[in-house]
Amino acid sequence: MCGDELIPPRADMTEDQWLRTAGPGLPDGPAPQAAPDARPRARGVHRRTLLGGAVAGAALAAVPFGAQRPAVAAPRAGGPERFPFPSAPGPAGEYAVLVTGDAGTGKEEQYAVAEAAREICRTEHIGLAVGLGDNIYENGPESDRDPEFQEKFEQPNTGIDMPWLMVLGNHDCSGLIPGSGGDPSRGDREVAYAATSRRWYMPGRYYNVALPAGGAQNDPLVEFFALDTNPVASYVVQTDPHYRWNGPYMREQRRWLDAALSASRARWKVVLAHHPYLNNGKHGSAGSYDGFVIGDYTSGIHLKELYEEVVCGRADLILSGHDHTLQVLEPTDRTRGTRQVVCGAAAKAGDGKAHFTHPAAWQDFSRNGFMVVKVSAAAMTIDAYTVDVAAKRARLAHRTRTARPVAAGARVPAEAR
């Protein structure tokens, strides 16, 4: 359900509307924990909401219950030697990271984007890649040995020989309905696959990875925090109590993220998630995904809360897919300085137009592409590339550079000035 079959959503809250109703800044502390039987907030009802309720009801009896603990990738005897993580910044004193999203179709567009990215990886000395979910269309893998891993990940990315930080998308966790996100337990198959792949890195359903600054600096230069947003952004109600929006899985993930961000000593912090916080594409933003504004799931209201209460003002970037577009949005009072980037055009393209008006440094709604994030002690740079699918060539379409991390008190080392 990341495709073209959805009706374009109604407008979500603009920046001006948000400033009038919510005001700049949000409390720094976590929100009170909702009781398991808490009633959903009352909101207006419209046709899309009723449609969502009907879809959810049709799927209730058919979605199987999942695992009761987050899956952890377990090494297997005789497993492959994995591609190593970069151990120090590259020749320019920076890490360069390839960013792709919504890639797993196995079709011409995916192969073209991957071929174009291979050349950029070579010239830019890229040593790490990111896959922002919807890794295996349309229903996710049937097991950790599903041949679709080869057809829709390994073969297209041949030559991009580095670790890939992978996150789960709604198509990876399909229930009865493709792309519904209604069976999060299916994501355990992708965690298990990490034990047998040289590229695919997913030690758990959510996890963090820090890259060292190198030299005399002991603290990490950049840290990535990979999330599983499916239980709080699914198109259907979660029937397994473990994966409900206020169930043990999401409570534990929130506690982990809050603690991990607090403990991180990295200069730059990047959150990886399939579903965006803000988005000018047709799926809209968390809290009103696809025009839904009530309920605990389809609207993404509780993911909106997670972003606003735990992530905004603490991470420098939110990197997301879900919408098949390329967007570099501007940090605002609403995000407390955190920048939202949408990069979901590695195999599918958008409908050619903006549906919302969140401030953007640059955006493209019609072409395939990818991005490269570069981090050094002095700056974070986002390079956005569009791809000519027929020619399999990438073009640098936009560059945004940020010199000051969001985290309060962060300082540039004297030698980096």
Image (cartoon, rainbow, N blue to C red):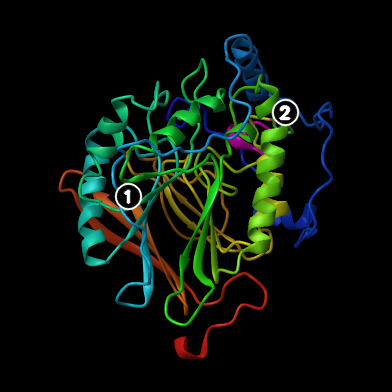
> Residue 241, labelled with which disc?
none
Marks 1 and 2, Cα distance to the nearest angstrom?
34 Å
**Along the line of sight, which residue is nearer the eye, 356 or 264?**
264
The residue most toward the front is 77
The answer to whether residue 157 of the structure is visible from this angle is yes
Amino acid type, callout 1: Gly
Against 186, is 17 above or below? below
Report the front residue among 113 and 258: 258
Q: Which mark is residue 369?
A: 1
Residue sitting at 31 percent across and 48 percent down?
82
Task: Give the residue pinned by disc 2.
Answer: 295
Q: Start and end of the magenta stretch? A: 287-296
* Secondary structure beneath label 2: loop
In the figure, residue 412 lies in which quadrant?
Answer: bottom right
Tell me the kind of residue under disc 2. Gly
Q: Would residue 300 appear left or right of 378 to someone viewing this image?
A: right
Looking at the image, residue 24 lies above or below residue 368:
below
Tag 1 secondary structure? strand
